[in-house]
Image (cartoon, rainbow, N blue to C red):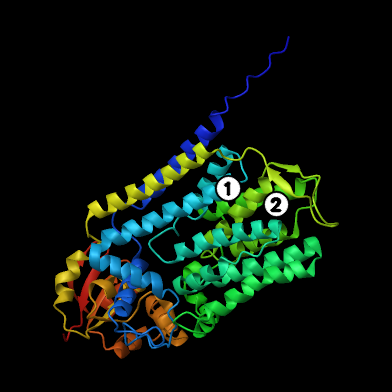
Amino acid sequence: MARTRAAAPPWFGPTVGLLLLLAGLGLAAAGSHGPLPNDDTYFHLRFGREFLDGTWSLRSPGSVSTFATESWVPTQWLPQVAMAWLERHGGLGAVAAASGALVVAYLGLLWAIARRHLAPVAAAALVLAVMLASAGHLTARPQVISYVLTAWFTAAWLRAVADRRPPYHLVPLTWLWAACHGMWPVGLVVGVLACVGAWLDTREARTALRLATVPLAGAVVAALTPVGPALYGAVVAVGGRSEFFAEWGPTDFTVPSPAVLALLLALLVTVLARRRRRPSWTTCLLALLALAWALYSARTVPVSAAVLAPVLAHALRRTEPDVTAGAPGVPEAEHHRGAPSRLELAVGGAAVALAVVAVVVLNLRAGDEPDDDLAWAAPALDALPAGTVLLDDWGRGGYLMWRHPQLDLVMHGYGDTFTVEELRRNTDLTDVEPRWDEMVADTGARWALLRTDSSLGYAVEHDLGWERVETGGDHVLLRHPGE
């Protein structure tokens, strides 16, 4: 007689799912603990300080360097001001605590979205996969706010199309997004595609037009932030500078994070292709959007993951047909089986809250020390008079403008403040292109802090004969012979 396999107890799936969720939250909390390692965090702190002190205005911000003269539009002013306020009152530990808490909250949001449609283990596994696909991007930068809102908008629009009810709460969220990060048009694109999908699925123009009032209102309120309509011009200007930044380059799917995203995209395509019924146009259009962001650039890989998570959860959901479903041509309404119990939701919410508390406590206790491998140069740089030109590495400009605000840096990573010609100058200097020595002379720099293994560092020291003042780690402080 054949033996029948014993069914797993009802508590087994939710328990394993919650354990996987706890593992992911633990990894996120551990990764958010300690000094701020991303150099870009520091130029956000410096810019936020300028806005907070009233040195700059949102309509006419200044520049931290005489070598960056572009008229630019602040697209991240609200989190920059918040970060500067936290640093002022709680130090760098408070900034790290807030950014870590945001990452943990993002994972909690993804779990809540996925668990609404998926079994416990599948929901937790999807959260872990999205976290891996976004690795390296979940840092103390305002861009994480865009990932949170992208996932929220996508899930809200999938539900709105199914319910045929406009998600009006997304309008004020669009205003908030437009004040936080330059990727706010992603929310409008998701909304427009959802409206088009709703019309293709139902052929009800009135329903589609009613839904379309949300992205239309969002486009209007985005121009009503303190920055004003100039925010639209800033979106266009980003494309003109993308060639100078590696993160805007093509996605390399041999790298682990994009490779995980590729697997998720392949899973989505397989699920949609094998469904008995044709998937909705809304699902297909949002899936294509996720694919487009994945292919567009390395910078938009986590945006793709944030769109993909709700779409994949929606496509993988356990469903049963509703025989009372409505109008002709409308896909049958579907209901989720195996929805989470109140106890599971309570435990999951408590796990997210506990992880947030852990991140905050650990970072506040860690103190106010930056990830400072340039501390050895601080006494010499602090002694330089205000306005001293410093020839520096492009990648360390953010830290230097925060730690030594009196210096006039030749290069830093906030590309919006540079003209295209100035960015090309920085690139030519870094790569030691022809006439690089004339460019160095034109800057008027008499001091340089450069990487010892960089072409520019070697050339300035050995070809121009600048004197080595001090060396620490992988950097060298150089002084012009006549200084």
Quarter of the rendering occupied by the N terminus: top right
Label 2, secondary structure: give it.
Answer: helix
- 1 vs 2, front mark: 1
Residue 30, numbered label:
none
Q: Whole-percent x and y of residue 164?
A: 71, 61
Question: Pointer 2: what residue?
Answer: 269
Q: Of label 1 and label 2, which has the lower sequence position?
A: 1
Q: Residue at x 47, y 79 (%)?
A: 225
Q: Which residue lies furthest to the bottom in this view?
A: 442
Amino acid type, residue under disc 1 in the picture? Ala
Quarter of the rendering occupied by the C terminus: bottom left
Q: Which residue is drawn at 22% across and 81% down?
A: 406
Report the front residue among 400 and 470.
Answer: 400
Residue 85 visible, this orientation: yes
Q: Is residue 275 found left or right of 291 in the rendered image?
A: right
Q: Whole-percent x and y of residue 102?
A: 41, 57
Q: Determine which quarter of the picture holds residue 198.
A: bottom right
What distance separates the C-alpha of mark 1 from that of mark 2? 18 Å
Q: Is the Cβ of the residue at disc 1 closer than 8 Å to that at disc 2?
A: no
Q: Which residue lies furthest to the right in this view?
A: 328
Q: Whole-percent x and y of residue 282?
A: 71, 60
Q: Whole-percent x and y of residue 281?
A: 75, 60
Residue 371 visible, this orientation: no
Q: With respect to residue 126, does 224 lie above or below?
A: below
Q: Which residue is drawn at 81% across and 54% down?
A: 326
Residue 114, numbered label:
1
Amino acid type, residue under disc 2 in the picture? Val
